[in-house]
Amino acid sequence: MNLLQGGGVLGNMHFTLDGGDDPSNVLNLMALEAYVSGAQPHAVARGLDLVAEDADLIPEGGSLVRSISGTSFLQLVTGEDWTLRWQRWRDGSGQALVTAVTRERAEEIAAFVTDRTGTAEEPREDKVDMGFWYRSARGPFRSTRSISAPQWPEIEQNYSSSAASALGKLMATRSSDVTGRLVLLHGPPGTGKTTALRALAREWAPWCQVDTVLDPEAFFSDPSYLMEVIIGSEMDLSMDADLESGEARKPQWRLMVLEDCDELIRGEAKEASGQSLARLLNLTDGLLGQGREIMVAITTNERLDRLHPAVVRPGRCLAQIEVGALSTLEATDWLDGETVTEPMTLAELYARRGGTEPHRSDSPIPQQVGQYL
């Protein structure tokens, strides 16, 4: 076997390795050898909420065969009549896959692993779990974090009357009310679009998982990244079965959040972004989105009349909301009667209240001739 390409046989399995493979590919193949050959025909998968860095997950009678340390930690352990592959990801969560000669034996080994891993901390009432996707050197990666999320009534006064009315209807939406698959929030910077999405994640938590894509340009330009997020997660959900009932957990709705995507959806996006816009539209109401309970939320600083017509056409958007500055009257009320002479964004209002508003001068700054600006 040379360093760039080679192959081999595991049991009755023939495999080929090349320069694109790494040790985890070998470990995964070895974990499935007994299952593929039929020697261990029963498999059980478990999601692990919290795996300690020093966790000892080698059952009695087991021998460590392979281990990998890096962005994630993997171990392959074998016993007389079972095989265990378990993995710990960077965020502390993990997964265990057990194959065994009987289902009871597989359940026993899986129970050993789950008994020695922790349970994720119950989210506080003012927090919500949100996923964060990004493309790493080894492919798409999802990290879960518990973030602060206000209740909608707590922040409703931070928005203009028109925006608050539209956002209130969006917050009250439930799975049976979903029509369009695109949520579009547009308006100047500092108007509270991100805060509204955090509140939305909390209001929708019972029926919708909210994930943020940190690199939207890569997400829509790389089909493999897109398909891993859209389809791969659904496969993971289908594997997470309720063993007592034998029924798979029903996948819930998902909302993918893409922030500041001006280049993706503005009028000239088709020429500037190539197939990215087409894939976005395909995801919301094309073939890619068919049969999948998924929505996309986009924030942009662009005006509505500058967005691509295909994005804002009737029927595509579940909500299309302009989040703008508060009027002088609304800003005055927000500041408890302090005089306001022009509309102000939420960021400007907080700066005024905190005393950090920048001072403006109506007089031009004198420049010396011959100096660089």
Image: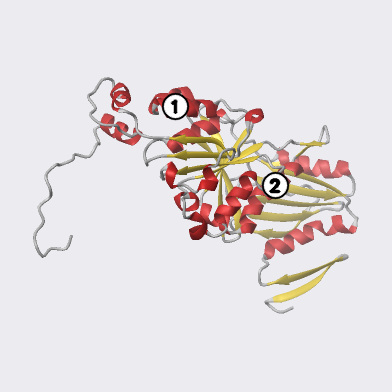
Quadrant for the N terminus in the image: bottom right
Tell me if residue 81 comes above or below residue 320 in the rendering: below
Q: Tell me if mark 1 has few (under 14), some (14-19) or many (20+) residues whose alpha carbon lies within 10 angstroms of its own.
A: many
64 or 363, which is in the foreground? 363
* SS under mark 1: helix
Quadrant for the C terminus in the image: bottom left
* Amino acid at dot 2: Gln
Residue 214 rendering spot, x and y as whole percentages = 51, 50
* SS under mark 2: strand
Can the viewer see residue 195 in this picture? yes
* Amino acid at dot 1: Ala
Tell me if residue 303 comes above or below residue 267 in the rendering: above
Number of numbered discs present?
2
Return the residue at label 1: 164
User: Residue sitting at 55 percent across and 47 percent down?
Assistant: 310
Tell me if residue 321 comes above or below residue 99 in the rendering: above
> For this view, does 131 lie left or right of residue 267?
right
Which of the 4 quarters of the picture holds residue 117?
top right
Q: Earlier in the sequence, mark 2 or mark 1?
A: 2
Tell me if residue 345 comes above or below residue 44 in the rendering: above
Residue 34 rendering spot, x and y as whole percentages = 86, 57
Q: Tell me if mark 2 has few (under 14), some (14-19) or many (20+) residues whose alpha carbon lies within 10 angstroms of its own.
A: some
Question: Which mark identifies residue 95?
Answer: 2
